[in-house]
Image (tube, rainbow, N blue to C red):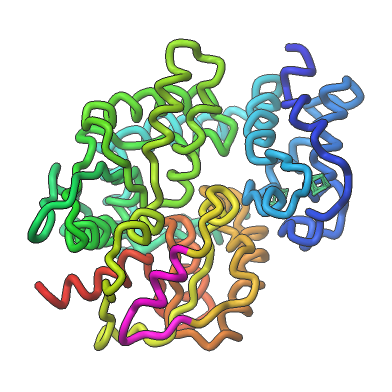
């Protein structure tokens, strides 16, 4: 393969080496080493494209894996460098010339090609996880997992089977219907946080919107793309587009920041696929984050009531793929300001990564926890009782991290806070 095809050389030329991104990069904060910074990684990518560095180089691979793809560097970059897209291309390129070892490749194949795209295997896996957590088997296995032990211990608590259920195909509006929307159920969301999906459609119903799910749809391919599995990601993107096209042209509400950012970028993912490019662009325009949709459609006097819920002071932590990936910052905060019976407080460094980063917390638990530790300190300092997020990966990371630290604070999705008023009505 041409070295130029292993990275996105044209995009790498946008970098003007100003270094403004360094102080916000969580991996640079951990090491203080240039090659662990966005600018350093771009230098490495350029060196690969120019033939000065082999894409099989161990240090190069390590820096690609070490990156959380949090895209904080994009938010502060004056040159508009599209680092997330560059990283997806670079990871796929490195994988194509130097595939990982047999066991790791097999584990990735199981995860990306068997489990994530299949509701059957997802349900079975989460059911098995619950069994292992309840019986202590997971702790036993973790003892033999070496460096991955912390990653296994940080997995979210799998809920009982009664919680792990899909949404109905259509949830009607309450009272007069203002319109209909599609809702992304997600792959792990119904298995681990089904209550968040139920809160999402309850809020939409309260605002007068009927919700429809794309039956048979499982995964949007975000985790595949972030991990360099671009062909798998494209296949899943085509399936996602097809299934949601079958629902008409209504907006598609997404309550997972990582999935939403990825689905809004399908046009880029399929830009070299002539048959799908335009369909992908049309589809992406329909995608809207949950907070974006609610903020735009809630009447001025709509005020969720969390009295009696015990949520107390709420601190919102921006998921990277919402603030850096979709530039959505104000809407979740303005919605929390409307909540009666709770008080929003601001947390320092809310826009920095919590260390979840998709499956990063499982693959690199030590780095993930080091990144989280700084967040935990900021959360403790702001005096909040409840951490609010808008992404399942972050919810898992906060749940596990605060549990580990012995904190009694609650961790909830924005939809759960806003649904408090709805559940109190019913
Ligand atoms: S995506 Fe995040 S971790 Fe990666 S280089 Fe940018 S700021 Fe650093
Ligand atoms: S802020 Fe942007 S232009 Fe400046 S060094 Fe970082 S990536 Fe390059």
- Relative to 259, is 91 above or below? above
Quarter of the N terminus within the rendering: top right
Residue at 41% in and 77% down: 337
Residue at 52% in and 49% down: 358
Instruction: Please tell me how many numbered marks the rendered image carries.
Output: 0
- Quarter of the rendering containing residue 365: bottom right
**x and y percentages locating residue 42 in the rendered image:** 80, 38
Task: Please state which of residues 392 and 238 is positioned toward the viewer in this rendering.
Answer: 238
**x and y percentages locating residue 426 in the rendered image:** 9, 72
| Residue 100 visible | no
- Relative to 99, is 129 above or below? below
| Residue 167 visible | yes
Is 341 part of what is drawn in magenta? Answer: yes
Residue at 50% in and 27% down: 267
Is 28 part of what is drawn in magenta? Answer: no
Q: Residue furthest right?
A: 52
On screen, residue 163 versus residue 300, left or right, reads left
Residue at 56% in and 48% down: 325
- Relative to 195, is 109 above or below? above
Task: Please state which of residues 124 and 239 is positioned toward the viewer in this rendering.
Answer: 239
**x and y percentages locating residue 226 in the rendered image:** 56, 38
**x and y percentages locating residue 230 in the rendered image:** 54, 26
Task: Please state which of residues 29 and 301 is positioned toward the viewer in this rendering.
Answer: 301
Task: Please state which of residues 294 and 147 is positioned toward the viewer in this rendering.
Answer: 294
Query: Which segment is the magenta one?
Result: 331-344
């Amino acid at each position: 393969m041409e070295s130029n095809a292993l990275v996105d050389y044209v995009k790498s030329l946008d970098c003007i080496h100003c270094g403004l991104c360094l102080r916000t990069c969580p991996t640079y904060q951990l090491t203080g080493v240039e090659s662990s910074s966005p600018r350093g990684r771009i230098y490495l990518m350029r060196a690969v494209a120019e033939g000065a560095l082999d894409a099989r180089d161990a240090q190069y691979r390590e820096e690609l894996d070490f990156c959380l793809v949090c895209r904080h560097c994009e938010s502060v970059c004056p040159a508009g460098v599209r680092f997330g897209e560059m990283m997806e291309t670079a990871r796929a390129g490195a994988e194509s010339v130097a595939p990982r070892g047999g066991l790791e490749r097999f584990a990735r194949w199981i995860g990306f090609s068997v489990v994530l795209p299949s509701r059957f295997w997802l349900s079975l896996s989460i059911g098995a996880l619950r069994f292992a957590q309840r019986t202590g088997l997971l702790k036993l296995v973790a003892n033999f997992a070496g460096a991955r032990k912390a990653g296994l211990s940080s997995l979210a608590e799998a809920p009982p089977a009664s919680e792990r259920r899909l949404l109905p195909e259509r949830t009607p509006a309450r009272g007069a219907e203002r319109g209909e929307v599609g809702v992304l159920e997600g792959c792990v969301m119904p298995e681990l946080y089904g209550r968040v999906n139920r809160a999402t459609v309850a809020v939409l119903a309260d605002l007068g919107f009927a919700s429809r799910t794309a039956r048979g749809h499982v995964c949007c391919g975000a985790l595949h793309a972030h991990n360099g599995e671009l062909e798998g990601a494209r296949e899943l993107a085509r399936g996602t587009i097809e299934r949601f096209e079958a629902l008409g042209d209504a907006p598609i509400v997404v309550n997972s920041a990582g999935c939403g950012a990825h689905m809004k970028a399908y046009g880029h993912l399929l830009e070299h696929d002539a048959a799908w490019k335009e369909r992908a662009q049309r589809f992406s325009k329909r995608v809207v984050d949950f907070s974006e949709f609610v903020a735009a459609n809630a009447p001025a006097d709509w005020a969720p009531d969390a009295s009696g819920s015990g949520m107390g002071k709420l601190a919102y932590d921006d998921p990277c793929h919402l603030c850096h990936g979709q530039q959505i910052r104000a809407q979740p905060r303005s919605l929390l300001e409307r909540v009666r019976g709770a008080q929003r407080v601001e947390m320092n460094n809310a826009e920095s990564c919590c260390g979840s980063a998709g499956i990063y917390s499982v693959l690199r638990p030590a780095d993930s926890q080091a990144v989280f530790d700084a967040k935990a300190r900021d959360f403790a300092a702001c005096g909040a009782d409840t951490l609010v997020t808008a992404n399942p990966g972050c919810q898992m990371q906060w749940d596990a991290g605060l549990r580990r630290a012995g904190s009694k604070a609650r961790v909830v999705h924005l939809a759960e806070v806003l649904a408090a008023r709805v559940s109190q009505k019913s």
